[in-house]
Amino acid sequence: MIEDRKLAVLRAIVEDYVATQEPVGSKTLVERHRLGVSPATVRNDMAALEDEGLIAQPHTSAGRIPTDKGYRFFVDRLTTVKAMSAAEKRAIAGFLEGAHDLDDVVQRSVRLLAQLTQQVAIVQYPTLAKSTVRHVELVALSTHRLLAVLILSTGRVEQRVIEVPVELTDDLLGDLRLRVNAAAAGERISEAATALGALPEQVGHDVTPTFTVVVAAVVEAMSNHRSDERVVVGGTANLARFGDNFDQTVKPILEALEEHVVLLKLLGETSSDLVTVRIGAEGPIDQLSATSVVATGYGASDDALSALGVVGPTRMDYPGSMAAVRAVARYVSTILDES
């Protein structure tokens, strides 16, 4: 374990390198940071940090840069994720609260994350499999046609136009609406689908065919999993900040951005309570060992329904990125919960 003073030196090196993208020397550290020790002491501390593999000397430069191990040590010693300022919170809330549907929420979230962090932002659409049914609305369009509107806890809305074999009376429509919602509302989609499937057997033979086609349409809407693997990316222009080493840093990320399966792997398993940070080779993609990923879960319930995060160079601003990712996830979760 390194002592507090060496940790302060490591923190200063990380902060300066992230800000300047230049190796950091002992003289610079003494000038920029109130470390309370001489340059000679700082040089000794830097030598000890280098021996422990937390910093390294690139090429023949007199300065040092953090290693992946150094970044990990720095992140692990962050006692808390720093809070966003009141102005930042107002800006986030104002930007996201203007969204009018789920697609708009996701698009706004990815743009906001990219702007806040100056990294590449990734937002996965809410996972349908873990969502619950909020309501099923049935509206008569004609005597033999109705519109079914499925509203899920993720904020997703599915609509189906259904042709029914008998005339739709007010009593029949009311009975359909009552029974469908009694079976499905508040249930996970798997349980809701099972309960709905049993409805045609619980009604009279004269309306069984009508219940059958309505239930089939609603269950089909529930089983539409297309959104589960949809990922939206924003801020690719921020890749220009990676530097000149295009083939080893920028090109692999550009290629990864074209594969949604890869992006889902980058986000990985997430929790709505924790912000996860994977640095360099800790990530699941070997070609992206020069990058780090900061991610968390979001959703409209206690379980994380989906994930969002940012990917960028290992020299990213970890405290700022972690704060932004957490704040956006919490606001999106609140919006989905209230929508």
Image (cartoon, helix red, strand yellow):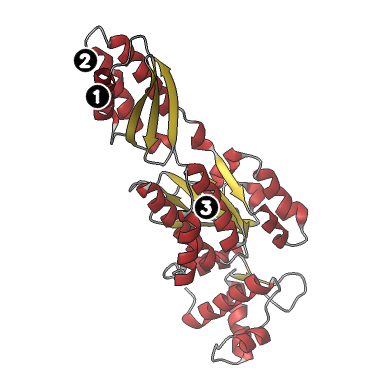
Give the mark nearest the N terminus, 3 or 1: 3
Identify which residue, 38 or 162, lies in the foreground.
162
> Separation of disc 3 and disc 2 at Cα?
44 Å
- Residue bearing the label numbered 2: 202
Q: Where does label 1 land, which residue?
A: 179
Q: Position of residue 28 (x, y in %)?
A: 67, 84
Q: Residue 196: percent from the left, percent from the top?
A: 30, 22
Q: Amino acid at mark 1?
A: Arg
Instruction: Using the image, determine if residue 267 lies above or below residue 181.
Output: below
Gap between marks 1 and 2 measured at Cα: 10 Å
Left or right: where 329 falls relative to 53: left
Closer to the chain start, of discs 1 and 2, is 1
Q: Name the disc covering residue 223, or none.
A: none
- The residue pinned by badge 3 equals 109
Which numbered mark, 3 or 1, is in the foreground of this view? 1
Q: Residues within 10 Å of mark 1 (few under 14, many from 20)?
A: some
